[in-house]
Image: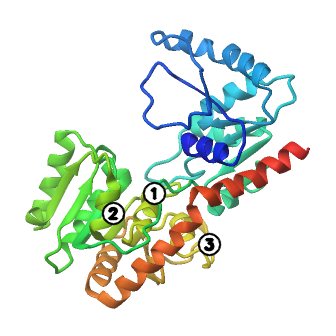
Amino acid sequence: MAVMWANGFHHRGHEVMVVTNLNDPITYSLDGGIKVRQLTGPNGNKLKKWAYSVPNLRRYIKEFTPDVVIGVLSTCSLVAWMATRGLGIPVIATEHDSFERPKSAPMGKWTWFTKFILNKLYSHVTVLTEADKKVIGNRLSRVTVMPNPLAFAPVESFPQKEKAVLAVGRIDAGHYKGFDILIKAFGMTSNDWPLQIAGYGHPESIDYYMKLAEECGIADRIQFLGFVSNPMELYQRSEVFVLSSRYEGFGLVLIEAMSQGCAPVACDYKGRQREIINPSSVLPQREEEQSAAVSEFCVCDNGILCEPDNVDQLAAAIARMISDDKYRMSVQQNAISRSRYYSIENTVDRWEQLLNSLIRK
């Protein structure tokens, strides 16, 4: 995200400096005109390594005199706040996961503290969804919804598709990603399509899910693809994409798949995936306010939404998307159009509105 923002700002003519840990290899490419500086000290003792960060960053800020500093995740946001004391430069903290968790995966005390207490330090905080802004309420006063940008350009001509259902995520995080729910649901569908799961996993994790697939009678229809360096090719050739997560802060893989013409089926955690697939709908009530569970999946122009952790709903939704060719083809085209909302160009537009409002102050 930081690299995409930096390149996007640079393309608009802004001066940009990225301060990061240069002891590790750089994975993503920054534009040549962007200044890059070392944040931390030498690798080794963690305390000594991070002890360099505040004086280093403060020195760069005094030299570069930025209008604003954007902190990526909680640690760097706190470092930025400490480095700017007395300099009159606003700091924006960026949050990249949700402000609530299901009962099966409660939020830790430190995570809660960083989100609801430390975030009060900053000039502004960005969150990924309107659902999170609603959860925050009046506990933070300066909050803007800033969804993550799409890394891929939406396809212009529709790609050649294969009859396959795709899921993407770390196999070792399979419970959080709901892969057990997905495998059980897929086992309840009557079709000859393969289920492909892309993502790194240790052998014991893959063995666990293969055993579950055998129990569900789909061992011959499931493929674990391992880590894939270029998932865009997978998205382009897959007919259907399933996000089966028990909870997600946003679902970046969802908009990636939609941009390449996949018809999405998504488990909707408290309205966050609903914002992507069906933004015109009303946000669902909080869990404790619901009088009864929704009994059926939601069929939308841009895809299908299901309850998390609901095998029957997910099975029925996948079956509908696979069997209804006319609906699936319509969804695929609509999903491409919807994904353009998350383009880097639109994202930078939203960022510039926020930055201008802070700089004017």
Q: Crowding near pointer 1: few (<14 within 10 Å), some, many (20+)?
A: some
Please give the name of the residue rendered at 57% of the width and 47% of the height, measured from the top-left corner: 96
Residue 275 sits above or below residue 168 on the image: below
For the residue pair 206 and 43, the one nearer the viewer reads as 43
Provide the secondary structure element on which disc 2 rests. Answer: helix
- How many C-alpha atoms fall within 10 Å of the one at disc 2: few (<14), some, or many (≥20)? many
The reply to whether discs 2 and 3 touch (Cβ–Cβ < 8 Å) is no
Q: Residue at x 62, y 58 (%)?
A: 345
Q: Label for residue 152?
A: 1
Q: Which mark is residue 43?
A: none
Does residue 297 appear anywhere in the picture? no
* Mark 2 vs 1: CB contact within 8 A: yes
Q: Quadrant of residue 312?
A: bottom left
Q: CA distance from mark 3 to mark 1?
A: 27 Å
For disc 2, the marked residue is 235
Kindly tell me whether residue 97 is visible in this rendering.
yes
Q: Earlier in the sequence, mark 2 or mark 3?
A: 2
Badges 3 and 1: C-beta atoms under 8 Å apart? no
Residue 161 location (% of width, % of height) = 26, 73
